[in-house]
Image (cartoon, rainbow, N blue to C red):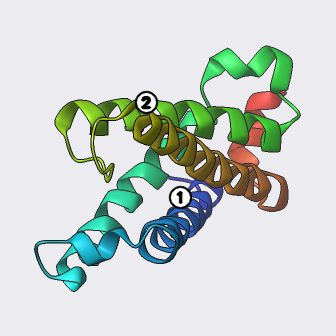
Amino acid sequence: MTKRFFISWIASSLIMYVLSNVWHGLILTDFSRLSYSKNLFLFFAALVYLMIGFIVSKAIDVKIFDKQLKRKPIIRGALSGSLCGIAFFLVATVVGISFSTGSKLENMLLDVTWQTIEQCLGGVVVGIVHIFVYDPQAHFEED
């Protein structure tokens, strides 16, 4: 684990966790429908966002993006984060843990759009960290 990875992991997890709480807690008021403790939910959500941040921080290094986006970490982060958002939405929908108020197409489109935006912004944070945090191992691999 490099310093760049660790900082991008924590920063992206934090920003996505905050965005999720703003979206679900303030804008959609989903928290009012919880059937258990809000504190318990927030604790588990924090753990989940640490996992999501880990995956988004790793996804920026997928070799598929190397050729076209090698020197564009913000775009790479946004693209890899967006793809992760779509994948996480699909998993959440299949498992049935989505916040959606039903299986209406409109709700599912809203959910996938928000999940994609949220993880895209997490990926942008990862890209910004890749710009501002020096990683000698990454520099060595480029040569």
Residue 12 percent coordinates (x, y) = 58, 60
In the rendered view, tell whether residue 118 sits above or below residue 72.
below
Q: Could you tell me which quadrant the C terminus lies in?
A: top right
x and y, in percent, of residue 67 in the image: 80, 15
In the image, what residue type sits under mark 2?
Answer: Ala
Left or right side of 84 for 137: right
Disc 2: which residue: 87
Q: Residue at x 81, y 29 (%)?
A: 142
Residue shown at 40%/73% (left/top)?
29
Amino acid type, label 1 = Trp
On screen, residue 46 versus residue 56, left or right, reads left
- Please report whichever mark, 1 or 2, sits nearer to the chain's N-terminal start: 1
| In-front residue for pair 142/85 | 85
Give whichever of 28, 9 is nearer the camera. 28
Q: How many marks?
A: 2
Q: Quadrant of residue 25?
A: bottom left
- In this rendering, does residue 33 appear at all? yes
Mark 1 lies on residue:
9
Q: Which of the 4 image quadrants contains residue 35?
A: bottom left
Give the number of the disc on residue 103.
Answer: none
What crowding class fits label 1: few (fewer than 14 Cα within 10 Å), some (14-19), or many (20 or more)?
A: many
